[in-house]
Image (cartoon, helix red, strand yellow):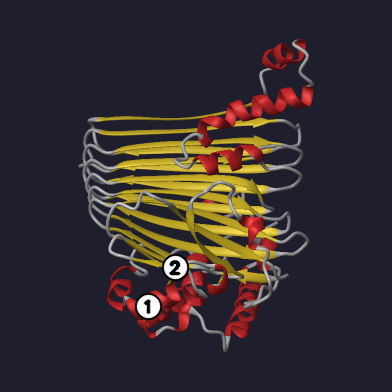
Amino acid sequence: MDTTVENITSKKDQFIASIDGTIAGASTLSTSHVVASIVESAKESLASLSFPTTRTEAWKYTRVGKIINQKFEVKPTETQVEIGTYHIPGIQAIEMVFVNGFFRADLSETLENNVISVLPMSEAVSKYPEMVKQYYGTIANDKKDIFTALNTSYSTDGLFIHVKGEYKDTAIHLIHINDSDQVIAQCRNLIITEPNSHAKIVTSYHSKKDISSFCNQVTEVVVKENSFLSIDKIQQESEQAFHISNDFVTQEKDSTFHLNTFTLTGGWIRNNLHVHAKGNGTNTDMYGLYQPILKQHIDNHTLMIHDGTDGESNELYKGILYDKGKAVFNGKVIVAIDAQRTNAYQTNANVLLSDDASVNSKPELEIYADDVKCSHGSTTGQFDEEALFYLMARGIKKDTAKRLLTEAFLKEVVDHSDILAVRELVLRYLH
């Protein structure tokens, strides 16, 4: 039964009051005068917006009650962190570490040269105020989404990356760690790639076991003409962790953007991805895998808008569901009337390994141009019993055989990462 409007409003006020009351006195991004007008506008939106219910179409299968019924607080921490636990073995990367949403300079490396700048947003607003003003808050939509408005209103810090040339030697690894109970971490990231530039980014999310935490992050990405950007997102959070990602991307002419989302663990996760290909000749790849176990809930919502001609987008999300795990996939592709010669492909495939597991899949196409090649599809089933029998007949134990089939099914997604160390890590954590 849906919660009444009065109760929703009351819970909303209590939820926000807890955050507002604990952020006072902390040195946060939202207090910077550079973004003051954006923050003020977001707080106005926050006051007018409501938390979604099951009557909200985009949230029909994902309830937010488990989040808003709790009191999450802003908790800066200088406690010792065993950062080695969160390294990706074999990766060559500049590491930026955020604990409970705050930048930890003692655990991080910053980088500034004529090719790339990698800084915390709290530092970027002082060093590059005009650039931050130009892009911050221009892509993320906090007029319609309450969680984006919440992030803009109370963001603590985040990552600023400005790619000015070809940065191919190493990756940038952004590490988020939540290590306090009932903590809310709200990082705000801004990534700008200049024309003809190249960069690879890895973001990983972690939380301590047996604590309830909420990561509510927003990332704005501007991929300029003829530039290349790939992002690998790795989610490895606890059974009690809540996570909402809102990623907003714009692409200019002949640009390439790749995003791979690897959801390995986490209690309740919602990934929102919005890509707007404004220029002609863009290339966009969106790949994802998820493997909910127990009562984990994983929801991927994507929106791909083609406005330019001769663009191409490829989207493939695959999931294997165990126990009472639940998954949601809603992918929408819009091809505008002038986006002729667009190729857009979208697929969602799922394997259920339990009678209690469930998935709700809804791929969508809206095509207004007439010279296009577009397709979408969704499949849900169980492992091929013949393939399982074939492996077991050759002396392979059933559990090992299932793992081999799991890896074979998901490897198509894993292989789209450009970084070998990431591919190896993800394969190790497949169930």
Which one is earlier in the sequence, the residue at label 2 or at label 1? 2
Residue nearest the viewer, comparing 35 with 336: 35
Which of the 4 image quarters holds residue 220?
A: bottom left
The residue wearing badge 2 is 110
Asked if the residue under mark 1 is in contact with the one under mark 2, i.e. CB atoms within 8 Å, the reply is no
Can residue 376 be seen?
A: yes
- Quick check: 32 above or below 342? below
Residue nearest the viewer, comparing 54 with 322: 322
Q: Secondary structure at mark 2?
A: loop
Q: Amino acid at mark 1?
A: Val
Identity of the residue drawn at 65% across and 34% down: 320
- Quick check: 216 above or below 367? below
The residue wearing badge 1 is 125
**In this picture, residue 147 sits left or right of residue 314:** right
Can residue 141 be seen?
A: no
Identity of the residue drawn at 52% across and 71% down: 150
Mark seen at residue 70: none
Q: Amino acid at mark 2?
A: Thr
**In this picture, residue 4 sits left or right of residue 32:** right
**In this picture, residue 4 sits left or right of residue 395:** left
Q: List x then y, in percent, for residue 348.
A: 52, 34
Q: How many marks?
A: 2
Q: Residues within 10 Å of mark 2 (few under 14, many from 20)?
A: few
Q: List x then y, in percent, for residue 315.
A: 43, 37
Q: List x then y, in percent, for residue 290.
A: 61, 41
Quadrant of image for the N terminus: bottom right
